[in-house]
Image: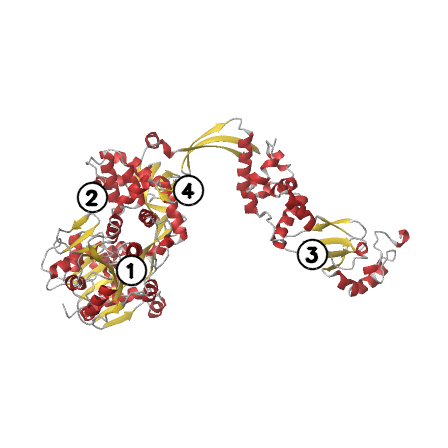
Amino acid sequence: MSSLPVAAVLPELLTALQHAPQTLLIAPTGAGKSTWLPLQILQKGELSGRILLLEPRRLAARNVAQRLAELLGEACGETVGYRMRAETCVGPNTRLEVVTEGILTRLIQRDPELNGVSLVILDEFHERSLQADLALALLLDVQQGLRDDLRLLIMSATLDNARLQQLLPLAPVIVSEGRAFAVERRYQALSAHQRFDDAVAQAVSGLLREERGSLLLFLPGVGEIQRVQEQLAERVASDVLLCPLYGALPLSEQRKAILPAPPGFRKVVLATNIAETSLTIEGIRLVVDSAQERVARFDARTGLTRLVTQRVSQASMTQRAGRAGRLEEGICLHLIGKEQAERAAAQGEPEILQSDLAGLLLELLQWGCRDVSELSWLDTPPAANLQAARALLSQLGALENNALTARGRQMAQLGNDPRLAAMLVGAGDADEQATAARLAALLEEPPRGRESDLRGAFARNQSNWQARSNQLLKRLKSSGGRGDISLAAGLLAQAFSDRIARRRGLDGRYQLANGMGAMLDRDDALSRYEWLIAPLLLQGGNTPDARILLALPFDLDALIADYPHLLQQSDSVEWDEAQGTLKAFRRWRLGQLVVKTQPLSKPSEEELHQAMLNGIREKGLSVLNWTPEAEQLRLRLACAARWLPEHPWPAVDDEALLASLEKWLLPEMNGVHSLRALKNLNLTVALNHLLEWSLRQRLDSALPTHYTVPTGSRIAIRYDADNPPALAVRMQEMFGEAATPVIAQGRVPLTLELLSPAQRPLQITRDLAAFWRGAYREVQKEMKGRYPKHVWPDDPANAQPTRRTKKYS
């Protein structure tokens, strides 16, 4: 083992761990950083306390722990142990614990000083999982405030090194060159005319015929694994074993994929990206990379997660290819064109940027951090996703005034997903607790396949669900009870009230309490029920409706009888478009689903007015009677905000006016009880409610409605949203005016539309003095001939203005 590549940097690494709080280790796949190095640090690192080794995946964590224990000639639970959800294997003498991500967070939360721990190793950090980013942020906080002697080692095969060095500028960077045999990398784009599973199976079987050795096939998800396995079963020789590998498989099936093939056989391991990193899969010489992965993307708007199949990064392609060179020279066939591969992103996108952050926010609040900027992050959690997380925690009763409630603190202690934690703490007696624990276990690892009826899954006796259920009951300090599916609807409603669904047709379509649509397959037996609660939803592909993956039918009356707070009552008065009248209703709603409606008679004036305001907000300001005078006042206010920004002018765009109806329109609505009366309101008077007296005076003086021309006539100024203010006036009335009139405290010249005696446009100008001196001569010649009875002086800037002809002058 000392010939492993990472052995060459062991002395340098041990020195770094002695002197630096954080150390970065970059070592390629197969260098021994996961399955050899932790034991060397344990034996030679002069550490007084335990080592925690974080592995991002449960499958990898168990296998790494078993491999390390085997190297010591021991069983797991002695010197080396592991902790993961629903499974713990540690003993009193355990000094090296391999833990999964959620477990590490729980350990830090329960003991912020990490007493008895000398070193935390974050393995495969390049995967940038949400929990790994959170663990790093919490550990750096622990080092800074509580444990300056705690050491942190961040290990990865491919690392965004510049980013990490920016966050940890003093951390030594140690690079192990690794030892891998040469891998021939080939590229072959899949045919667009073939089904994906058929094309992949053809490529794999072709490579198997040409080359010796076992093969590792990377596919985006379990569905593809199952379909390609069916295709390969018909194409490969009898000495080829087909071994799927993904997290939800039973341990025995996982071991079959990981261990060497029996003598006389070779194997094809069909794996998700779980096989990219820590797992050592024996005997692999060939790799086929579909160049695809399936990632979860959270939509903050809908609160749902969408599974997206996308091209993997160049770093992932490198990782996958490296699997072919562990034992001897190998071949990696990437099922993508070489040019496309070169255009792929260098690194995968961190999970923290595209995930539901409710669980992370609950952890931060339990840590005492109300503002994410208080911690050090490689990527700051997105504001929109944090806002969605706050909304959900508030809905669950965990958050109030940006602090955890007593219920929220109980939820945080459990360490579950926030929704499941809300269900668990909401369980009352022992039977409810047993039911809630079983539901939580089931929803954490939902059944695979097409079964959508939660009742069938609940009745199934599955060992992993039972183990997890027992663990949760222990956390609840429950004496144990009997799981009862009849209690499930009420428990689920405490966590998923927004996912209560009502049928809206006979084709499997439902409306959710949060306003979204959801759907079942048309032939799904559940679609005959009017009411469902659907804790497991997935945002669809090309359809706006979410897909219901798991749901429970329930009796609405029974649920409301037990949980009356689920219904909200509201009274409203609404416009009846057909009859042109107002009608009053009392409604009972479950979220946005109207359960019952009852007409009301004789609404109060206050209710009528509120209904009118709601109607205006729904239909827009155009339902009001906007006279030219009211339109001009609104335009003057908008212009004032642009030209005189030093004064506090009210916003008068549609959005602002609709938001402030109570301030400017409602005061004028006394005695208004009908739509006709509403249409007769004087909006000019109403808009003045937005202005204090001094601001009204300033508006009238700086942006007047009229301008007094030299003849004494008061001519209306025409204000416009897109053009300068204009004054349309007969030219003779402007004689004697030497310069262009200005408004807005001299900042804005008026556009003069100079008219003929017949009110036809003669000239448009914003520079009257220049017009008198220049273009006026041509106008004068033409006008003398056309209007000889009118005065056309040679010096109009100093002439007497007139409204009359020569006869009356």
* Quarter-of-image position of residue 345: bottom left
Name the side, left or right, on which 773 lies relative to 70. right
> How many angstroms separate mark 3 from mark 1 (CA)?
64 Å
- Number of the front mark, 3 or 1: 3
In the picture of the structure, the residue carrying the numbered disc 2 is 471
SS at badge 4: loop
> Reading the chain from its start, which is encountered first: label 2 or label 1?
1
> Reading the chain from its start, which is encountered first: label 4 or label 2?
2
> How many angstroms separate mark 3 from mark 2 (CA)?
78 Å
Crowding near the residue tagged with mark 4, few <14, some 14–19, many ≥20 C-alpha atoms within 10 Å: some
- Number of the front mark, 4 or 1: 1
In the picture of the structure, the residue carrying the numbered disc 4 is 515
SS at badge 3: loop
Which colour assignment does the render follow? Answer: secondary structure
* Quarter-of-image position of residue 627: top right
> Reading the chain from its start, which is encountered first: label 4 or label 1?
1
